[in-house]
Image (tube, grey):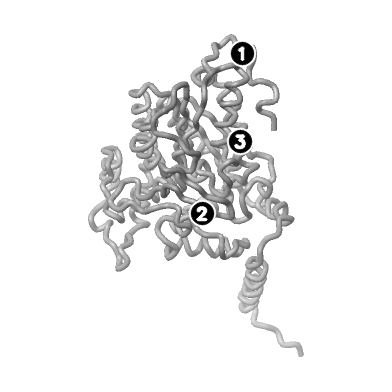
Amino acid sequence: MTRCEPPHHRPCLLCFVQTLLVLAVGMAPIPATWARARSALESARSPELNRADREATAGGYYEGLLGGVDTTEGTRFELMLRLLGKPTDWNRFRAANVSRHLPDDFLMFELQPNTHRSLFGQPFTTNAHGMRDRGYAVAKPAGTFRVAVLGSSMDMGWGVGADEMYVNLLEDWLNLHAERLGLGRRFEVLNFAVAAYSPMQRLEAYRRKARQFHPDLVIYSATMLDVRLLEIHLCDMLQARVDLRYDFVREAVAAAGITAADLALDSKERLLHKDDIKRKLRPFYWSIYDDTMGTLAADCRAAGVPLAFAIIPRVGLADAPNARANAVIRLRGIAEHHALPVLDLSHIFDHLDPGTLEIAAWDDHPNALGHRRLFLGLARALVKDRALYNALFHVDEARHVAEGPRPGVLKE
């Protein structure tokens, strides 16, 4: 008589075997030829489930990046990266020693100046002002038009070389286009983006840094993860007992009912009731975002500087049409509330294989090809917006309609 296993043991055994298989396959590096298989596997999943998964893991990644690798979410995300084939020498942003902590400071951290490191397999350099950019003087040269970009990791050039970043590709194109138009104007696109910067930190970067360079146009880069970054920034400030600086932030925290008991710290000086704080703050995130953009818009108008609102996507299903729809509507609504022109690039990666556009199977930041697509999308959006195009090139509307972009300048 054949001995049978108790029925209730079979699911446990099956789960154990499946786990061993996942670990065995996942710990090995993923060959490039698996990219399409991975993409197909992701496509089979529900976009809404995918959005939730990716936002949760992206949040865990950033919390690990900012708060150390000992956080529960950060550790869980690290395991997921290893299962996807992440090499052990693929350093975290913080571990790469390219940023510095700012104690008791609203910004919390910033890029170190004059950095020369290898980050995510690419050279990572910063200039004397702590910008992931080419070298610029604070004083604006005569005949120069400056564009300041405020953003986070994708704009900073996470995982790509300096000359591959869409920000620098844009600068090169602006100068080429001005030359073809016969203008005696030079362009400098100044990159003030820092990985994991929340909308509030981008505002602070403008006030503290960007406006010292007297920009002639400011481009604010928004992403579908901005609310998550805002949450992380708020929690980190509350944990570090940093002054919240802006009245609208203080008022939101007060309206959320955050008490001294909520702010209790554990033995490692981490928020003991972090989940409760997040739950209380969650209804206020979008209003804080709106107030942040209102403050930035007012600053730019006071200085007579146009402000444009760009929506920048990640690669893959996390920012696919259905998954991003609600966030894009919210972001556009905020921009329109403050009468800002919207440069919506959220569709740039649609219908393309993520495996050809992301820096790695475990990281959905755009690679060099992805940055080129971002540049092309942004340049075309600037050309189509008559007011912004005229501000850049002083071309009247009739000439703008007749010529448009010169042939060959914006080809794929």
Examine the rendering and report whether any part of residue 123 can be seen: yes
Marked residue nearer the N-terminal end (1 or 2): 2
Residue 300 locus on image (x, y percent): 37, 26
Q: CA distance from mark 1 to mark 2?
A: 45 Å
Q: CA distance from mark 2 to mark 3?
A: 33 Å
Which is nearer the eye, 25 or 13? 25
- Side of 135 relative to 271 (left or right): right
Query: In which image quadrant can residue 127 be found?
Result: top left
Marked residue nearer the N-terminal end (1 or 3): 3
Instruction: Tell me the quarter of the image containing the C terminus.
Output: top right
Marked residue nearer the N-terminal end (2 or 3): 2
Task: Identify the mark at residue 347; answer none if there is no mark.
Answer: 3
Which residue is painted at 30% across and 65% down in the image? 266
Residue lying furthest top in this view? 398
Residue at mark 2: 117
Which residue is painted at 35% across and 42% down in the image? 284
Residue 125 locus on image (x, y percent): 50, 48
Residue at mark 1: 401
Q: Nearer the viewer, mark 1 or mark 3?
A: 1
| Residue type indicated by callout 3 | His
Q: Are the residues tagged 1 and 3 within 8 Å (C-beta)? A: no
Q: CA distance from mark 1 to mark 3?
A: 24 Å
Residue lying furthest bottom in this view? 1
Numbered disc 2: secondary structure: strand
